[in-house]
Amino acid sequence: MTSVPQRHTYYGAPTSSYTQSRQSTSYSSQKRKHVTFGPYIVGSTLGEGEFGKVKMGWSKTSSSSMDVPKQVAIKLIRRDTIPKNSEKEVKIYREINALKHLNHPNIVRLEEVLQNSKYIGIVLEYASGGEFYKYIQKKRRLKESAACRLFAQLISGVYYMHSKGLVHRDLKLENLLLDKNENLLITDFGFVNEFLPENELMKTSCGSPCYAAPELVVTARPYEARKADIWSCGVIMYAMLAGYLPWDDDPENPDGDDIGKLYRYITRTPLKFPDYIAPVPRDLLRAILVADPKRRITIAQTLHHQWLQPHLPFLSVMPEEWDHVSKNQEFLRQPPQKGEAANSARPRSNCSVSSTNSKGEKRNSLIMDSSLHSQPVPPQQSQSHAVAMPSSPSPRLRQSPVKSNNRHSRSNSAASIALQAVVDAEREYHATHPPFTNSASTSALQFEVSPHSTSPRHYTFSPTKTNQNIVTSLRDSVIIETSPQKGSGTFLIASSLKESPNGTGLPEASSVPAPSGHKGQLAVKGQVSYHGTHNLALHRRPRPTSYHPASCSTFCDISQVPTLQPTVNGEDTTSQTQDNVNKSTSQGIMHRGSFSMNKPFVDMQIVAGDLIKSGGDGDTAAKKIHDQVEDADHRVDLLRQRRQSQRYSVVYDKLFGVAQQSEDNAVEDAGPGGNAVEHGAPGASVKRDKKRFSIMSIYSTSKSSVESGSPKNEDKHRGTDSENNHRGSTKRITSGQELSVNDQQDTSRKSSAAKNTEPAKQASRLKEVKTETSRKTLSAISKQELLGQNSSAQKSKVEPRIEPEATKKNATVQRSASLKKPAKPAQSRKKANRSSVMVSSVAASNTENARPREQSTAKRVIDFFKRRSMRL
Ligand SMILES: Nc1ncnc2c1ncn2[C@@H]1O[C@H](COP(=O)(O)OP(=O)(O)OP(=O)(O)O)[C@@H](O)[C@H]1O
C-alpha cells in the first residue's frame, strides 16, 4: 500500500498559564534561534517542486499574545537557479501574476511575494489538508457525494479562472491541494496563460500526459485552451470516482510511458467505467472526455449538468461576486498591523495543520511545443495589481456568520462568507431533495431571465432575510438569483446564463443542451442507488495518480517568450508599490490583457537577510513555539532525572531492568523536539515525527500484550530486530506476570551475595544464618515490589478509562494524530487508536503517579540495605 506521509497537528500556543509561568524563567534566559524569511518563521518542508522547496511558515507578528501565529506555505526559489529569460523564470512570473488576480475560495491564495538576495519567496495560503491525490489514494476512491462536492469546487475555480481570461493548462490531481476543511485548492499556475477573446487558441502543448487533452498531443494545430482544461477536469473527476485514471489499462502500454500509444489508445478506445460509477456522473464524464474538442461540453454546460445540481447555489456565484466578497473580506479581517505596509496586511488564521513531506514526484509536466501563439506583450499597466483596499466594506458581509463545520466554507478563505451563503442554500436544498435522485427531471431546474437595469459591473446585494438568496449582477447587467423555494421542492435559478459570444465564458442561455450523443443517458428515471458495493478487484489495481513520465523531451522555445524586465531594486519597488496601490484601488477585477508574464516586481517586498537565523526576542510566535520546545525539554529532563535516581540500586535495576530499557527508548525518542513536533514547532522534522510514531507503535504492542495478558502472546513478538523493541515494551507491562517469585528470589539472592562477598568470607556460621534471614526479608520486599508492579500494570490497563482531564486532552491529541496516519486496515487503525490512549496513560503515570511510587520503592530498598549492613 502506498504510504501517505504521517501528519501531525498543530494545536497552537500552549495554555496561557503555562506560557506565563515559563516565560519568566526559561525563555528569557535561553533565546532560541529561528530561521526566518521576512516576517515569517520558516518551519519544516511541506514538499518539493521543480523550483525548490515549499516550507511551512508562521507569521512572526500576531495582533495579540493569545493569537495563534498565521501559517503559510512559502515556496522558496533560489534566485541563482533561475537563469534570466529562461522558461523557468517565465513560469515563476506567470504563476505570481496569475495568482495576484485570482480570488476564489478554491484557488490557492497568494499572500505576498518576498525576495532577498538569494531567494524569491512566494507566500501562499497554507493547504493543511495535504495533497489531493494522496487523499484519494488513502480512500481508494471517493464516495459519489464527496466527489460531486469536490468536482463542483474544481469546476467553480476553473470557471472563475476562465472568466478572468486565464487558463491553467496543467490541471491534474497533483496540482490540487486540500484545505483544513477538505475543500479543494487549485495550485501550481506555472503553465497558466491568458486567452484573448479574439485569439484564444494556443499552441503550447503543456500539461501532463495523462491529463492532457488529445488535441494537445495528436495535432500540431492551435487548440482551445479552455476545452483542454475541461478535459483535464474530466480526467480528475474520473479518478475521484473510479480510483484510477481513465485509459489506464492498455495492455500494450501498461505504464503509459509511450505517449504516442497512450493517445492512440485514448482516441480509439471508448471510455469504460467501473460498475460502481452511476449513470449520471457517467453521462457527465462521457460529455467531458470527448476527444473532439468541438463536441466536448463547455464549462458553462458542465456547471448545469444534472450531476452538479446539488451544488448549483455554489456554482451560481459569479466571478465578480468572488472578487467582491474577497476584497471586502480582506478588508474586514486584515487591519494593517503596526509597522506593516497596507498591502502586506496578514489575515489571522486558525491553525489546524498537518504536514506532508513529499518529494517532487511529479516532474512529468510536458511541454511539447512551447512557442507561444502570437502572444502580444501585455501592457505595462498589467503589472499594477497590488493588494487593494476597498473603500468600504459591505455591511452585509460584516453580519455574515461563517460556520466552521460547513463543507464548502473555509474560515480563512478569501470568500468564505459568500461560500457560507451558498452552503446554507445548499443545505436548504438538500433538506428538501433526496440526494442524487436520478430522474430525467432537468426541468426541475427552472431558468428565468430577469433583466435588470443595473449598470455594468455593478454589484447588487439583496437585502438579506436569510443567507439563502444570493443576488449578483452579471456582466451583461442581469441579476442572477438563486433561491431554493421552501416547500415547493423546486430550485429556482433566475439568470440570464448566456454564453457570451465574445468568449468570456459566461454561461449559456436558459436551456442547457445535453451533450451530443448522450441524451439517452439523462433519461434514466426513478431512484438509483449509487453506493453499490462493487468489488474493486474486478478492475486493475487502482492508480489514481499513476503517472506516466513524459516520453517526449521537454523543451521550450524561449525565443518566443516576451523579454523579461530587468530586476528592480528595493527603492523602485517601494515607490511603485504605492503608485500601484492607488491604481489598483479602482481595479476590481482583472481586465483582459492585463495578465503578464513579465516580472511581477510590484508586489515583491524586499526582505532582509538570507534565511537568516534571528533571535526570538519580542517575537510572540517564536516565544510560543519556544515554550512548547521548552515544555518538551522539561519533560525529558524529568524522565532522565527519574531514571538516574533509579540507578543506585542494583536490585531495582534487576527488577525493572526491562522496563528501564523500554523507558530509555522513550527518553531518547521523546527528546527535545519530540513534543515540539506534536505542537508543530518550526523545524520539527519528519524524522522526529517518525520516532514519535514508533513510540506509539511500541506502546501499541504493549497494550495488546496487556490485553491478552498472557506470556504466550508476547512470544509472538519475538524474532526480528524491530520486534525486539516491542518485546521490551511488552515486558514492561507484563513483567509482573512473567517473572516468578522464585526468579525474584534468585535475583535478590545474587545481588545480596554480591554485596556480601567480603563479609561472607569472614563471617561465621552464625552470620550465614543471618544472611539467610536477610535473604528472606529481601524476598518479601521483592514480592511486595512485584505486587506493586502488577498493580501498576493493571493501573495502566484501567487508566485510559478513567483519565484525568489533562490525560484525556493528551489522548485526544494523540488519537487525532494517529487517525490521520496512512491508510491502514481497519484493525490496525483501531490498534493505533488504542495505542494513542496507551501513550497518554503511560505518559500520565510517568509524570504524576509513577514517580512518587518508584521513589518510595527505592527508599525501601536502600533502607533494607542500611538495616542489613547495620546488622552485618
Ligand atoms: N499552499 C501549500 N500548502 C501546503 N503545501 C503546499 C502548498 N503548495 C505546495 N505545497 C507542497 O509542496 C509541493 C510542491 O509544490 P508545487 O507543486 O507548487 O511546487 P512546484 O515547484 O510548482 O512544482 P511543480 O513542479 O509541480 O510545478 C506540493 O506537492 C505540496 O506538497
Image (spheres, rainbow, N blue to C red):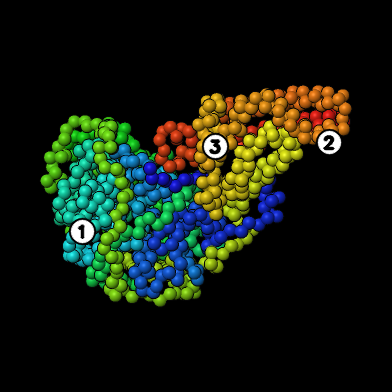
- Mark 3 closeness class: few <14, some 14–19, many ≥20 residues within 10 Å: many
Q: Is residue 334 visible?
A: no
The residues bearing labels 3 and 1 have C-alpha atoms spaced at a distance of: 52 Å
Nearer to me, 612 or 475 = 612
- Quarter in which the C terminus is drawn: top right
In the picture, residue 612 is in which quadrant?
Answer: bottom right
Q: Which of the two discs, 2 and 1, sits closer to the camera?
A: 2
Q: What SS does tag 2 mark?
A: helix
Badge 1: how crowded within 10 Å, few (<14), some, or many (20+)? some
List x then y, in percent, for residue 267.
16, 53
Say which residue label 3 marks: 726
Q: Quadrant of ligand 1?
A: bottom left
**The quadrant where residue 193 appears:** bottom left
Q: State which tag comes first along the sequence, 2 or 1.
A: 1
Disc sitting over residue 163 in the figure:
none
Q: Name the residue tied to disc 2.
A: 758
Residue drawn 52% across the image and 28% down it: 713
In this orientation, which residue lies closer to the viewer: 585 or 218?
A: 218
Residue plotted at (50% across, 71% down): 117
User: Picture coordinates of residue 252 (x, y %)?
Assistant: 21, 51
The amino acid type of the residue labelled 1 equals Gly
Whichever of callouts 3 and 2 sits on the residue coming sooner in the sequence is 3
Q: Residue at x 21, y 54 (%)?
A: 262
Q: In screen coordinates, is 672 left or right of 500?
A: right
At mark 3, the secondary structure is: helix
Per the image, the residue denoted by label 1 is: 260
Please tell me whether mark 1 sits on a helix, a strand or a loop.
Answer: helix
> Tag 2: residue type?
Glu
